[in-house]
């Protein structure tokens, strides 16, 4: 069932992205080719799928047009990956098993491709097929989740500043909750808003997202030191080599995985009031931490 959910979700989002992104032949061709190179380089589309399944849980079915919200989230995620991989940041040459954007198209075009995906995402968000009030709340939620205050950009900044310093638990948790967890949480919350969820339902999704988002990044830290570049689809051991703040560096692998498991259990408990409708999201949460196996 979960495999089917992942495969169907990926297919739906890929189809939507194909329609929403400018074609590679659209002038100026180079920027559209660079955008598409990174968007369609692979990836499980986890954030859009979490968004869609949150909406399905709240409303009992997939609301029409939810795939456009999911696609905008994927554009924002991909923009962050393009910029993450740049020489000024992680200086990585491999992403999703393929050459990174700046390796193929050059650094200047890669920067602009990331910028373009961000602006394209907000154009899509502005046209979402939901009530205007919900649309504004969705845009605000996503802007906050990708911003500087407890959001993705703020987490990236703290991550850079933490390099070659001995990590402490509070800083590490802040980095992971902001850099990775904030967009995962925003994906779930905005799916709930799109589906017309109540304040209490949105709060449960937020609690779930905060727990699962942190667990996801803890497992990413572990995989970075336990799997090969081929398995990861990106350069393995890079965080260790650069002495970045990671959970294994601070707590060790076993304790890190125990913490991730505990977070998933806590997150899933947040959804208990949804009953059977929450099973798919709970299964997805367990899948995110079981990537270690």
Image (cartoon, helix red, strand yellow):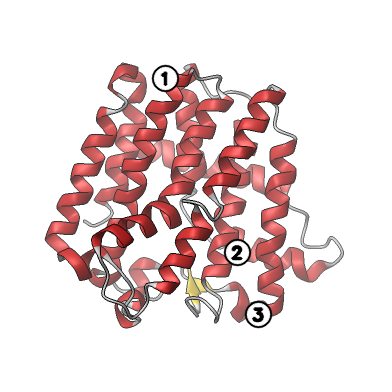
The image quadrant where one finds the N terminus is top left
Residue under label 1:
200
Say which residue appears at 76% left-offset and 67% top-offset.
31
Other residues around mark 3 within 10 Å, as few (<14) / some (14–19) / many (≥20): some
Quarter of the rendering containing residue 100? bottom right
Upstream in the sequence, badge 2 or badge 1? 2
Quarter of the rendering containing residue 37? bottom right
Quarter of the rendering containing residue 180? bottom left
Residue under label 3:
107
275 over 127 or under it: above or below: above
Q: Nearer the viewer, mark 1 or mark 3?
A: 1
The kind of secondary structure element at disc 1 is: helix
Residue under label 2:
38
User: From the viewer's perspective, is 142 left or right of 108?
Assistant: left
121 over 106 or under it: above or below: above
Upstream in the sequence, badge 1 or badge 3? 3
User: From the viewer's perspective, is 55 left or right of 130?
Assistant: left
């Amino acid at each position: 069932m979960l495999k089917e959910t992942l495969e169907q979700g990926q297919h739906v989002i890929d189809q939507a992205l194909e329609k929403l992104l400018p074609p590679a032949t659209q002038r100026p061709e180079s920027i559209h080719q660079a955008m598409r190179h990174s968007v369609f380089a692979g990836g499980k589309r986890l954030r859009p799928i979490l968004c869609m399944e949150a909406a399905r849980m709240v409303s009992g079915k997939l609301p029409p047009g939810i795939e456009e919200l999911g696609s905008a989230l994927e554009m924002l995620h991909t923009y962050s990956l393009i910029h993450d991989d740049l020489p000024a940041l992680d200086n990585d040459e491999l992403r999703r098993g393929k050459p990174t954007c700046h390796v193929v198209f050059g650094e200047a075009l890669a920067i602009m491709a990331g910028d373009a995906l961000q602006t394209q995402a907000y154009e899509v968000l502005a046209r979402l097929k939901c009530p205007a009030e919900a649309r504004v709340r969705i845009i605000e939620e996503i802007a906050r989740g990708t911003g500087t205050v407890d959001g993705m950009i703020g987490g990236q900044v703290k991550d850079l500043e933490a390099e070659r310093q001995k990590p402490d638990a509070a800083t590490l948790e802040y980095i992971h909750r902001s850099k990775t967890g904030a967009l995962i949480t925003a994906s779930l919350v905005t799916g709930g808003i799109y589906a017309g969820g109540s304040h209490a339902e949105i709060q449960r999704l937020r609690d779930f997202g905060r727990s699962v988002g942190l667990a996801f990044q803890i497992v990413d830290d572990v995989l970075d030191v336990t799997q090969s570049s081929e398995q990861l689809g990106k350069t393995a051991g890079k965080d260790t080599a650069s002495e970045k703040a990671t959970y294994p560096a601070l707590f060790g692998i076993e304790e890190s995985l125990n913490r991730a498991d505990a977070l998933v259990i806590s997150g899933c408990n947040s959804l208990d009031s949804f009953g059977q409708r929450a099973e798919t999201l709970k299964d997805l949460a367990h899948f995110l931490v079981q990537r270690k196996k």
